[in-house]
């Protein structure tokens, strides 16, 4: 009898109550924190994506297999700083960044050439975002100040003001680039609460 009662409580009633609570009070989070464009899901603010077009901000490298940012195979490369393969990978990534923006003489931020432990990090540092701003501005024909403004308005501050470092979500930045005048629904926001540049462009 105890087995049946506990099976009913912990196996059926409790999961249903928790699921219902999450759907009502944390709907976006319970469904993956998805981002929608024209009513269709195009990504999640929690999972990074691989961007390679020069007109986009690039994410940090991903070590997941068989493809980058494979959410079902979260992993890092496990390569140490003295590993020759890691050195070659970093050198190749630096070369790619230099070729995409040969006039940029700023130091390459480390998160643009090394993968995260999860391989799924959706954020890059402010240094990585501002490093790419001249290329983005040139490709789109915009003043660099407009791109810098976009980065600032997408910056996510430290948790409770003291934990971690400010970062920017790469998917949000690229959505602002690709769809500056179209509706983008972000998790936790209503359309009338979005920043002005996300609703109408710069």
Image: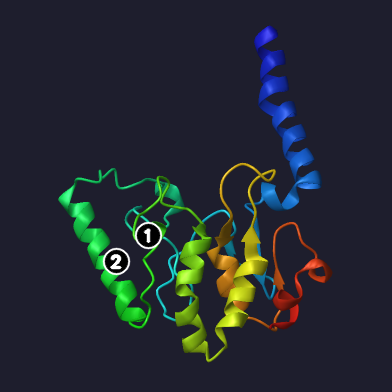
User: Horizontal placement of 146 versus 123: left or right?
Assistant: right
166 versus 164 height, above or below: below
Give 22 or 126, whichever is nearer the viewer.
126
Q: Quadrant of residue 78?
A: top left
Q: Are marks 1 and 2 in contact (CB under 8 Å)?
A: yes
Give 18 or 114, whichever is nearer the viewer.
114
Q: Residue at 77%, 40% (x, y): give it.
A: 20
Question: Would you call the spot at circle 2 few (<14 residues within 10 Å), some (14-19), or many (20 or more)?
Answer: some
Say which mark, if any, is on residue 93.
Answer: 2
Q: Which residue lies most toward the left here?
A: 84
Say which mark, if any, is on residue 61.
Answer: 1
Residue 18 in sight in this render: yes
Q: Quadrant of the C terminus?
A: bottom right
Say which mark, if any, is on residue 45.
Answer: none
Q: Residue at 16%, 51% (x, y): give it.
A: 84
Q: Quadrant of the N terminus?
A: top right
- In the rendered image, residue 21, in percent from the top left (x then y), is placed at 79, 39
140 versus 86 height, above or below: below
- In the rendered image, residue 44, in percent from the top left (x then y), is placed at 58, 59
- The earlier-in-sequence mark between 1 and 2 is 1
């Amino acid at each position: 009898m105890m087995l049946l009662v506990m099976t009913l409580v912990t196996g059926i009633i409790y999961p249903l109550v928790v699921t219902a609570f999450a759907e009502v009070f944390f709907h976006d989070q319970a469904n993956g924190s998805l981002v929608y464009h024209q009513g269709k899901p195009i990504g999640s603010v929690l999972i990074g994506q691989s961007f390679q077009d020069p007109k986009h901000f690039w994410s940090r490298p991903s070590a997941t297999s068989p493809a980058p940012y494979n959410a079902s195979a979260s992993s890092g490369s496990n390569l140490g700083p003295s590993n020759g393969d890691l050195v070659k990978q970093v050198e190749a990534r630096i070369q790619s960044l230099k070729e995409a923006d040969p006039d940029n003489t700023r130091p390459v931020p480390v998160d643009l050439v090394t993968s995260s432990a999860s391989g799924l990090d959706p954020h890059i540092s402010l240094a990585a975002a501002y490093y790419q701003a001249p290329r983005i501005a040139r490709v789109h024909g915009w003043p660099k100040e407009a791109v810098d403004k976009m980065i600032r308005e997408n910056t996510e501050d430290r948790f409770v003001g003291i934990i971690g470092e400010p970062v920017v979500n790469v998917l949000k930045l690229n959505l602002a680039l690709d769809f500056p005048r179209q509706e983008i629904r972000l998790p936790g926001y209503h359309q009338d609460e979005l920043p002005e540049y996300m609703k109408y462009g710069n």
